[in-house]
Image: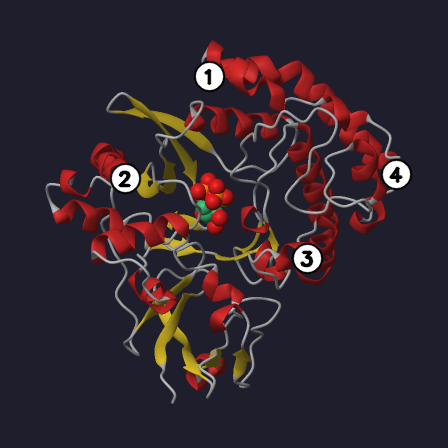
Amino acid sequence: MTSERECFVYIVLPNETEFVTAARFRISRTRDGEPVGELIYGKSYLARGNAVELDPTVLKLSSTQYETARMSGFFGAIRDAMPDYWGQRVIERNAGQTGLEEFNFLMQGADDRAGALGFGLNAEPPAPRRTFNRILDLEKLQATAETILNNQTDDIENQDDVQELLLEGTSIGGARPKAVVEDDNSFWVAKFSSPQDRWNHPRVEHAFLKLAKLCDMNVADSKIVEVGGKDVLLVRRFDRDHTDEGYRRHRMVSALTLLRSEESPAAKNDWSYLLLADEIRRTSSHPEQDFTELYGRMCFNALVSNLDDHPRNHAILAKNTHWRLSPAYDLTPTLTIALQNRNLAMACGLHGRMANKENLLSGHARFLLNEEKANFIIDDMINIIRSEWDSCLHRAGVSHQDCKTIRGSYIYEGFFNPIS
Ligand SMILES: Nc1ncnc2c1ncn2[C@@H]1O[C@H](COP(=O)(O)OP(=O)(O)OP(=O)(O)O)[C@@H](O)[C@H]1O
Ligand SMILES: [Mg+2]
């Protein structure tokens, strides 16, 4: 028996602000019930002079029908535009049921998806939205997010509140509670705190983003706003740019997709900065600059114990027809008591995931860096982190107690140990 779910894929082309229809996407099932994804670009889309590919690895512009049996049929570029853990929770809360099919998440995700893609059942794309949530609305969005987090189903007086959250911040990925708001002619990812947090996450993440900037990295802009007595981190979206005609949307593909990998435990063996560098070499219009940037990012994560640096926390971005490594985002400490050995989420040298100087140096050639330059990048970063750590946390308003709590993430002892 076969069953099918299908939709149209829309895209906002470079330098434009409205969706056009690009492709059809379908999930069908084999006789054994295994899902297979199929994607075919529209003839009229391919005939446009300005058509662009949905992703630079698998879905190149072509009249071929693409098929995949991996990831339940969801091509990486489509998965990147889908709600993740947090968005799925809001959608299920709104639907009043759990265990929804992935295709439902794709269709019910809001118009705030990362990147330039949209999805719908009509051949004609929807008109662009003109009004968006603003910082003023954050208090209510935060309160609704909290009740969802606490599973306090009776506390939501009005189902419209969940609907509102559904429209803002379900499709942008990630696990933490969040929404998307417009302010100052930009879109911002608003990241709320969560009741389980052991420190003020918004302020600490803000401090880490600023520290990364001081280390000369390309980093998303951020600011803190206080809403209803709580801090919210606003991170400026780099995949949207304001123009007089509306917002441009830039294509964005995660490193998970570039690596053709997934989140299953077995697939984690492919998670590697070295393999990511190989993919950047193939896709970036400026690979040498992006190699230096990626190498620095990997070293920064090791130095400040941002150990949750999984491949959805890296992306490439196409502001026009060319792909580049995106600015850094989601930089936050992971506390571990291990003083001798810490692991990043991705392999960062020839000795695996060890967040260790010798290991970081060992892979230098894959980033087209000689050992001297790689050494210089690390030592320079160590000096900056040592001199700026305290003042960065202080300027971001991190409390004395929180500074003490996260102190263990700062350049840990084992970083300098020789690998035996
Ligand atoms: N500044 C930004 N501009 C555009 N897209 C962004 C930006 N920041 C985050 N994103 C997108 O939103 C997703 C979720 O953001 P982020 O990683 O900060 O959230 P999170 O919930 O902390 O994630 P995690 O699940 O890794 O803890 C990212 O994977 C990325 O696709
Ligand atoms: Mg993340």
Residue drawn at (19%, 51%) of the image: 163
Marks 3 and 1, Cα distance to the nearest angstrom? Answer: 36 Å
Q: Nearer the viewer, residue 321 or 190?
A: 190
> Label 2's element?
helix
| Mark with earlier residue (2, 4) | 2
At mark 3, the secondary structure is helix
Label 2 vs label 4: CA separation? 47 Å
Residue sticking out furthest to the left = 157
Going from N to C along the chain, the mark reached first, 1 or 4, is 4
Left or right, 400 with reference to 133: right
> Answer yes or no: do the residues labelled 3 and 4 have beta carbons within 8 Å?
no
**Which quadrant of the view contains residue 309?**
top right
Of circles 1 and 4, the one toward us is 1
Mark 1–mark 2 Cα distance, whole angstroms, equals: 23 Å
Q: Residue at x 63, y 59 (%)?
A: 266
Closer mark to the observer between disc 1 and disc 2: 2
Quarter of the image that includes the C terminus: top right
Nearest to the observer: residue 393 or residue 105: 105
Question: Residue beneath label 4, please?
Answer: 371
Q: Which mark is residue 398?
A: 1
Q: CA distance from mark 2 to mark 3?
A: 34 Å
Q: Position of residue 149 (x, y in %)?
A: 30, 39
Asked if ligand 1 lies within 8 A of label 2, the reply is no
State the residue position of label 2: 145
Task: Look at mark 3 in the image and give the residue it sits on.
Answer: 270
Q: SS at mark 4?
A: helix
Identity, as a three-letter code, of the amino acid under mark 4: Glu
Residue 360 locus on image (x, y percent) = 78, 38
Question: The residue under label 1 is which amino acid type?
Answer: Val
